[in-house]
Image (cartoon, grey):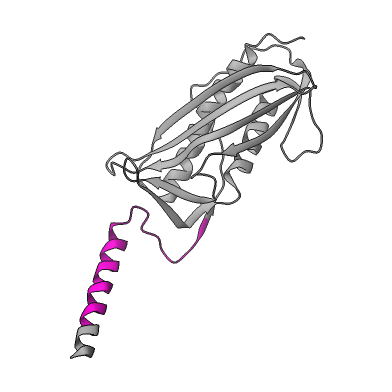
């Protein structure tokens, strides 16, 4: 009798687990996948109007990532207060490192400064750009219209002992994605970050810095 009861309990638990797995947004397989973060320039974006670069160097410093987005695993928002962590799909490195690298690469190509140094560079600069990612998730609250959400708080200051903040702004972009798959989410992150960096490029070009 006890054996039959234990068997029944086990069967119910297995059915529950199978149902829960089927309802998961991420529907993970047994294979693990890692994704890069690549900022894509918006199709209609134009170059910032800055005919000559500022006679200064820029160091991209630390880009922090606010909890709960600091881990490498992809995160989906499935309710107002509910989030799901996908253990099978993740960034290839920490999101803060990837964001810092993409920002440095983008601004280097923009040509706004005589040189732009990445976070991992041992060299500093005349100005330091740092920031905090306050949102980095796939929004799956409505599976009919999922999206990728990226928010960055960025500030730039002089690198000297008396260097003050010369620029401070918050950017947020939500990009609709085809579905809630990790591939679609990675692509959406790239589009959202590209829009943010395009705005950052134009905002920095409009600054009044010594030339």
Quarter of the figure with the C terminus: top right
Q: Furthest residue to the front?
A: 2
Q: Is residue 83 left or right of residue 64?
A: left
Q: Is residue 175 above or below residue 160?
A: below
Q: Position of residue 177 (x, y in %)?
A: 38, 39
Frontmost residue, 168 versus 43:
168
Is 145 one of the magenta-colored residues?
no
Q: Position of residue 118 (x, y in %)?
A: 72, 35
Q: Is residue 47 above or below residue 94?
A: above
Part of the protein shown in magenta? 7-33
Is 12 one of the magenta-colored residues?
yes
Quarter of the figure with the N terminus: bottom left
Frontmost residue, 155 versus 176:
155
Q: Is residue 14 left or right of residue 51?
A: left
Q: Is residue 180 above or below residue 169?
A: below
Q: Position of residue 18 (x, y in %)?
A: 28, 67
Q: Is residue 79 left or right of residue 201?
A: left
């Amino acid at each position: 009798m006890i054996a039959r009861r234990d068997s029944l309990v086990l069967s119910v638990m297995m059915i529950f687990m199978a149902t829960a797995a089927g309802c998961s947004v991420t529907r993970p397989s047994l294979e693990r996948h890692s994704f890069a973060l690549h900022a894509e320039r918006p199709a209609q974006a134009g170059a910032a109007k800055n005919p000559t670069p500022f006679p200064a160097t820029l160091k991209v410093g630390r880009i922090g990532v606010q909890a709960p987005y600091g881990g490498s695993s992809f995160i989906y928002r499935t309710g107002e207060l509910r989030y799901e962590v996908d253990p099978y799909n993740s960034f290839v490195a920490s999101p803060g490192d990837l964001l810092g690298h993409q920002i440095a690469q983008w601004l280097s190509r923009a040509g706004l400064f005589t040189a732009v140094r990445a976070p991992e560079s041992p060299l500093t600069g005349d100005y330091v750009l740092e920031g905090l990612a306050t949102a980095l998730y796939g929004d799956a609250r409505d599976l009919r219209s999922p999206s990728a959400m990226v928010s960055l708080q960025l500030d730039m200051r002089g690198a000297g002992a008396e260097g003050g903040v010369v620029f401070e702004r918050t950017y947020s972009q939500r990009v609709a994605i085809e579905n809630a798959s990790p591939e679609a989410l990675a692509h959406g992150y790239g589009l959202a970050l590209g829009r943010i960096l395009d705005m950052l490029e134009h905002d920095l070009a409009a600054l009044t810095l010594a030339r």
